[in-house]
Image (cartoon, rainbow, N blue to C red):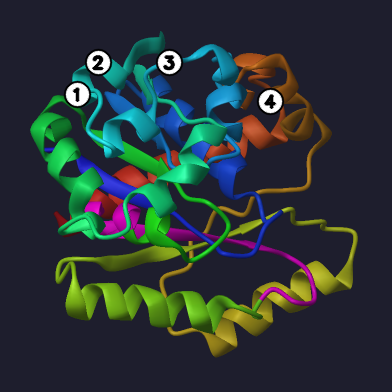
Amino acid sequence: MGRIIVVANQKGGVGKTTTAINLSASLAELEKKVLMIDMDPQGNATSGLGIEKNEVSNTVYELLIGQNTIEECIQREVFENLSVLPSNMNLSAAEIELIGVDEKEYLLKKEVDKIKDEYDFIIIDCPPSLNMLTINSMTTADTVIVPIQCEYYALEGLTQLIHTIELVKERLNPKLEMEGVVFTMFDARTNLSLQVVENVKENLNQNIYKTIIPRNIRLAEAPSHGLPINLYDNKSAGAENYKLLAEEVIYRGEEEF
């Protein structure tokens, strides 16, 4: 049965979508069957995996409003072992259109439950806000990965996110757990990056991944080519580190599940 992991942080620009794309692709490279679900109306995870987001007619939006089935919306084997449930700007209307719909917090879960046994991992990229799309993602998931940028305001908003995860666990999804924190955009040349890592470790009673994702030019370039980093530049530091993160995720899952 597939493990479902949400990548979430309501703070934008922390490497959330980069992590969702490259963790998915690295798990696929390690011969796991992976589905990546893009729950962000910006559709950056969709275009970052080479799908022309504005030309896709069957997306998460059509799925949530009941227009299409999940089988009709999934783009299969976009890369080897990696399928995608795409998104685009239409999804931003879902929040308004679903007002008054019964059990709207579970719309995604009901659909994903139908196909989750086909995959080893389902990775969900959330929007950078705590809205109905994020809540849907969290009611569907087993665990949450939180990317944290190594910068001064890293801890800001994190307590709010952890509070939201606890609320969802309490009221909507009792099995939801914090998978862990992954540090992104680490710059070994600055004391600040090192201080942030130490600060978070001291203040946060959470699992923290050993793998730290560096600030990396190749990693920043890859989405404009519609490729994950392991296919864009397999020898880059970014590719090496996301592969290590994927191995940690697999190993942690084998220990717990």
Q: What residue did someone put label 1 on?
A: 69
Are circles 1 and 4 on residues that touch, CB within 8 Å? no
Which label's residue is closer to the chain start, 4 or 2? 2
Q: What residue did someone put label 3 on?
A: 57
Please state which amino acid type lies under the numbered disc 4.
Answer: Pro
Along the viewing direction, whichever of 162 and 210 lies nearer the viewer: 162
Residue at image point 19% right, 38% down: 112
The CA distance from mark 2 to mark 3 is 10 Å
Along the viewing direction, whichever of 122 and 132 lies nearer the viewer: 132
Could you tell me which secondary element the residue under label 3 belongs to?
loop
- Label 2: how many Cα within 10 Å (few below 14, some 14–19, many 20+): some
Is residue 195 within the magenta segment?
Answer: no
Which label's residue is closer to the chain start, 3 or 1? 3
Along the viewing direction, whichever of 81 and 51 lies nearer the viewer: 51
Please state which amino acid type lies under the numbered disc 3.
Answer: Ser
Could you tell me which secondary element the residue under label 4 belongs to?
helix
The CA distance from mark 1 to mark 4 is 28 Å
Q: What residue did someone put label 4 on?
A: 223
Are circles 1 and 2 on residues that touch, CB within 8 Å? yes
- 1 or 4: mark nearer the eye: 1
Q: Is residue 223 visible?
A: yes
- Label 4: how many Cα within 10 Å (few below 14, some 14–19, many 20+): many
Q: Quadrant of residue 152?
A: bottom right
The span picked out in magenta is 136-154
Q: What residue did someone put label 2 on?
A: 72
Which label's residue is closer to the chain start, 2 or 3? 3
Residue 87 location (% of width, % of height):
47, 30
Could you tell me which secondary element the residue under label 2 belongs to?
helix
Please state which amino acid type lies under the numbered disc 1.
Answer: Thr
